[in-house]
Image (cartoon, grey):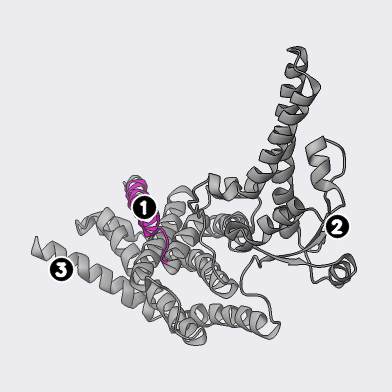
Amino acid sequence: MTSSVCLFARMIYQNYIGQVRQLKRNIMLFFVPICVFLFVYLFFALNNVDESFIEPLEIGLILEDKSIFAGMVADGFTSSEAFTEFANVTQGNGDEIYKTFNEGKLDAVILMPEGFVNSVMRFSYNPIIVQVNHSEPLKTLLIKNVIMSYEKYITTVEVGILTLFDQMEDLGYDWDTIVSYNEQISYELIFTALSRTSMFSYEEIVNVPSVVSTIYYFIAIIVMFLMYIAIYAAINLIREREDMCFVRLKISKISLFNYIISKAIGTTLFISTIVFGWFFIFTAFTGGVMSKAFLMMCLFLVVAILFDISLAMFMTACVKREEGVILLSNIFIFINAIIGGSIIPIQMMPEALQNIAVISPNYWMIRGLLYFQSGYNLREGFYIGSILLLLSLAMLFITSKRYEKVTV
């Protein structure tokens, strides 16, 4: 048993040293990503690119309605903590607000016309007018959803009040009673709109943690480069097969499964050495604040590297020729980069694309790294890491079985 463990450890060591000795290749593998990281970092720094993907909305509010209820509606916008977390509301007169809006400093202008509150109570047409700056589509969508939520609420209640109005008429209620009920319900409608935050308890749902742009792209680029570097493991495995190494391996009575796992682990340790070098340089550039759970993030990275290597080796079990593996790998990596978040940030993907992205390994690796980087929802990060580890072992097992059939 001890001799088997020593043999397994020696195979891992030999694979690791064999990778390290390829000096020229390793210099390229280390410094090419560093140049890309440096370009991204300098681009964000020198061009004053905002670090967060979604800045708070800047909204101008014009109140032409001078009633007390109009003022209460405006206070509902400015005093709601849930609303002000993602929007800064500036209230002023029409000339000032529109001037600021035309200068491009506001994302939207909300105009509450004279008699708006009274029109709500009387069900007459006198709508709030909203003008939106369409320079940022994401902000435009957010503003539309906020305003439409108010519209849906008011129109839904309006339908209910009109139904009650018709029913009271059919039941023979006198006009004064009907009008009295209408006024009471209309007032409740306004106050409910104002106090809507008191009707709910808030629980934050974070699908993908938010992160500054430089760190996100650092993680996304690492994930993409890991897949490219893992191709070398696949190429080495194909060349060993072509050199009949596995036939000689059977003579030595070394388990093919153990041999392939040792190669995967040795290559994982080698690539991990390179990646941690990237981490050291990046944390130095960013002031030494990279992760709130750095050790767990490093462990997740090692698992992600093992997964990429296992996937690359698995491809060699399906495609026999080196050219075919390289072509298949490049196509697979390119598609993963697009749908998996390495090019378009996950947080900014359309919902339809996010639904497709769940089949991409990039998506889950970036998501897991963001969980550990932010320190948020570490449990799901561990789940993702565990699933990647199990899939890695499964792919290595299938690869060894396929190679056993080839060498028979």
Q: Quadrant of residue 63?
A: bottom right
Q: What is the distance, in whole Å, between disc 3 and disc 1 at their CAs?
A: 31 Å
Q: Is residue 8 left or right of residue 169?
A: left
Q: Is residue 335 magenta?
A: no
Numbered disc 1: secondary structure:
helix
Identify which residue is drawn at 69% across, 35% down. 184
Q: Quadrant of the N terminus?
A: bottom left
- What distance separates the C-alpha of mark 3 from that of mark 2? 83 Å
**Residue 238 can be seen, yes or no:** no
Q: How far apart are the alpha carbons under marks 2 and 1?
A: 54 Å
Task: Identify whether 384 is placed above or below 41.
Answer: above
Residue 46 seen in this snapshot: yes
Q: Which residue is mark 3?
A: 6
Crowdedness near tag 3: few (<14), some (14–19) or many (≥20) residues, C-alpha within 10 Å: few
Report the front residue among 399 and 106.
106
For disc 1, the neighbor class at 10 Å (few under 14, some 14 to 19, many from 20) is: few
The image quadrant of residue 348 is bottom right
Relative side of 275 to 358, left or right = left
Q: Position of residue 183 (x, y in %)?
A: 74, 35
Q: In this picture, which residue range is highlighted in magenta?
A: 375-403
Amino acid under disc 3: Cys
The residue indicated by pointer 1 is 383
**Which residue is the site of mark 2?**
64
For residue 399, above or below residue 374: above
